[in-house]
C-alpha cells in the first residue's frame, strides 16, 4: 500500500459537525479541524491517558507504546481500544486504521525513524498533536518546566474533540491536586538523588523536565538540579560526594525499584550513604514522573512517602 495514499482521509467525514473549525498549533505545526476526530490513535502512554481521562476512548481506533500498567480507573476503557504495537507502529499499520488524528507523548513518534514528520500527516489530512512538555522548541533544556504543559494538553484535546466542559473540570482538579502538594511540601529542602536506572553509570535527572518538577513540587532538592536536560548520566563519585538525604527510586519495567535498592545496599561504598543506611527511600512509577494525567498521582505519592519518613 502506498503510504501517501489519500483515500482513507474520507473517514474524517464520520466526525460530528461542530459550529466552528478548531485550529491548533503544536510544536510549530498547525492544523485545522473542521469536525472532532473520530478515528484517533495515541502514541505513548501519557497521550493515551489524557484521552482516557477525558472519556474519549470511543473516538480511538488504536494505541501504542505503554511504559507500565494502565491505572485501574481507566483499565476497562483502555481494553476497549486496539493495541497496534508494543512500541511505535509502522506507518503502514497506522495508515491501515484510516486515522484522522495522531496524538504523541514524545517527539520521537514523529521522527523519520518512526512515523515521520507531523507535516507529512497533515498533508494527508490527518491532524497531529505532540504533548506540550515534549516540544523542545517551546521548552528549552535549560528552562525548568511548570505544570502548565499538562494543563494545556487537556485544554487543547478538549477543544479538538468538542469536550471543553470535561476538560475544564479535569484542569481544575489536576491543578488543585498539584497545588495542594506545592503549598504543603514534605521534602523540607532535603537533598535527593533521583535514580532511574544503570549500575556502571547512574541515570538520573537534570534541572528541567517533569521528574525535576516532581521533586521540586514535593520540596526536594535534587543533587543534579544545576545540570541541563531532563535525563542525564551522573557518576557514582558525585552521588557519594553529595551523600543525599533521600533517594527517590523510579519504578520501571526495565529497572525496578527493588533491583536498584538491592544494588545500592550490596555495593560496599554506596551502602555507606546515609540514605541507604537509614532506609530513606521513596518510590514513584515512571509514568507518574511525566507531565501527563498521572503527574498529580506522582507528586501526591512522593509527598506522602516523605511525610512517612518523618
Image (cartoon, rainbow, N blue to C red):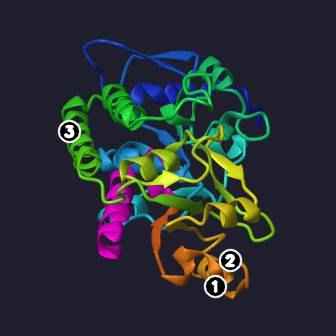
Q: Which residue is mark 2?
A: 270
Q: Choose the circle earlier in sequence order: 2 or 1.
A: 1
Q: Is residue 253 above or below residue 138?
A: below
Is the residue under label 1 in contact with that under label 2 (CB below 8 Å)?
A: yes
Q: Residue at x 25, y 44 (%)?
A: 179
Q: Is residue 288 above or below residue 129?
A: below
Q: Which residue is mark 1?
A: 265
Residue 276 image offset from top left, x and y in percent: 56, 79
Q: Which residues are magenta?
A: 287-310
Instruction: Measure the alpha-carbon separation of dots 3 and 2.
Output: 43 Å
- Label 3 sits on a secondary structure element that is helix
Magenta segment, prevailing SS (helix, strand or loop): helix
Q: Left or right: 63 with respect to 1? A: left
Q: Choose the circle earlier in sequence order: 3 or 1.
A: 3
Q: Which residue is mark 3?
A: 172
Q: Viewer-proximal residue, 46 or 266?
A: 266
Amino acid at each position: 500500500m502506498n503510504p501517501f495514499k489519500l483515500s482513507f482521509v474520507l473517514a474524517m467525514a464520520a466526525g460530528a459537525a461542530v459550529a466552528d473549525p478548531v485550529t491548533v498549533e503544536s510544536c510549530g505545526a498547525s492544523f485545522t479541524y473542521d469536525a472532532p476526530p473520530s478515528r484517533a490513535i495515541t502514541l505513548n502512554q501519557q497521550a493515551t491517558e489524557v484521552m482516557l481521562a477525558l472519556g474519549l476512548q470511543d473516538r480511538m481506533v488504536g494505541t501504542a507504546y505503554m511504559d507500565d500498567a494502565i491505572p485501574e480507573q481507566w483499565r476497562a476503557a483502555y481494553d476497549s481500544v486496539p493495541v497496534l504495537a508494543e512500541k511505535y507502529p509502522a506507518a503502514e499499520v497506522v495508515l491501515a486504521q484510516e486515522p484522522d488524528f495522531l496524538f504523541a507523548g514524545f517527539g520521537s513518534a514523529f521522527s523519520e525513524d518512526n512515523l515521520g514528520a507531523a507535516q507529512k500527516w497533515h498533508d494527508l489530512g490527518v491532524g497531529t498533536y505532540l504533548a506540550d512538555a515534549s516540544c523542545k522548541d517551546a521548552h528549552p533544556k535549560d528552562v525548568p518546566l511548570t505544570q502548565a504543559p499538562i494543563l494545556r494538553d487537556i485544554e487543547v484535546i478538549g477543544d479538538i474533540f468538542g469536550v471543553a466542559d470535561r476538560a475544564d473540570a479535569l484542569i481544575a482538579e489536576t491543578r488543585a491536586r498539584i497545588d495542594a502538594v506545592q503549598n504543603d511540601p514534605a521534602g523540607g529542602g532535603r537533598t535527593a538523588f533521583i535514580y532511574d536506572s544503570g549500575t556502571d553509570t547512574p541515570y538520573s535527572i537534570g534541572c528541567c523536565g517533569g521528574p525535576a518538577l516532581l521533586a521540586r513540587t514535593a520540596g526536594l532538592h535534587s543533587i543534579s538540579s544545576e545540570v541541563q536536560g531532563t535525563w542525564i548520566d551522573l557518576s557514582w563519585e558525585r552521588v557519594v560526594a553529595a551523600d543525599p538525604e533521600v533517594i527517590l527510586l523510579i519504578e520501571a519495567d526495565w529497572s525496578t525499584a527493588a533491583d536498584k535498592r538491592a544494588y545500592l545496599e550490596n555495593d560496599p561504598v554506596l551502602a555507606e550513604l546515609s540514605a541507604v543506611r537509614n532506609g530513606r527511600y521513596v518510590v514513584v512509577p515512571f509514568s507518574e514522573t511525566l507531565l501527563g494525567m498521572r503527574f498529580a498521582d506522582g507528586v501526591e505519592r512522593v509527598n506522602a512517602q516523605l511525610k512517612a519518613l518523618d
